């Protein structure tokens, strides 16, 4: 599949191999963030401000410091 190359007795990733590796890493991270957002949805009734902050950080609409500041402003 041309994902690795054997050169001078060492294995090295090809550009295609590196792309496949980083795509798998990206997809795994996306799945984890989706699970975190679902957890926030499930517990929103218990801690609505925290749940909104977690979803905002998970979907990239704000940074962690912004989310924390937003939680502090509403309290």
Image (cartoon, helix red, strand yellow):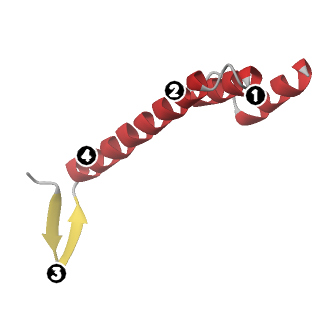
Residue underneath mark 3 = 9
The mark nearer the N terminus, 4 or 3, is: 3
Residue 23 on image: x %, y %: 32, 41
Which residue is label 2 attached to?
38
**Secondary element at tag 4:** helix
- 52 or 62: which is nearer to us? 52
Q: Residue at x 24, y 66 (%)?
A: 12
> Would you say residue 60 is visible in this rendering?
no
Which one is nearer the viewer's eye here, 13 or 44? 44
Ranked by sequence position, the earlier of labels 3 and 1 is 3
Residue 19 seen: yes
Tally of marks: 4
Q: Reading the chain from its start, which is encountered first: label 2 or label 1?
A: 2
Foreground mark, 3 or 2, reads 2
Secondary structure under the numbered disc 2 in the rendered image: helix
Where disc 1 sits, the SS reads helix
Asked if residue 5 is positioned above or below residue 40 in the image, the reply reads below
The mark that comes first in sequence, 4 or 1, is: 4
Marks 2/1: CA–CA distance: 17 Å
Relative horizontal placement of residue 18, taking residue 72 as reference (left or right)? left
Residue at image position (68%, 19%) is 45
- Residue 67 position in % (x across, y down): 75, 28
CA–CA distance in space, label 4 to label 2: 27 Å
Q: Mark 4 sits on what residue?
A: 20
User: Which residue is at a point 16% across and 81% down the rendered structure image?
Assistant: 9
Separation of marks 4 and 3 at Cα, in angstroms: 23 Å
**4 or 3: mark nearer the eye:** 4
Q: Are marks 4 and 3 in contact (CB under 8 Å)?
A: no
Q: Earlier in the sequence, mark 3 or mark 2?
A: 3
> What numbered label is drawn on residue 67?
1
């Amino acid at each position: 599949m041309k994902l690795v190359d054997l050169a001078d007795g060492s294995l090295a990733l090809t550009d295609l191999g590196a792309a496949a590796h980083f795509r798998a890493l990206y997809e795994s991270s996306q799945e984890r963030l989706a699970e975190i957002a679902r957890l926030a949805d499930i517990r929103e009734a218990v801690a609505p401000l925290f749940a909104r902050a977690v979803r905002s950080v998970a979907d990239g609409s704000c940074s962690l410091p912004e989310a924390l500041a937003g939680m502090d402003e509403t309290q």
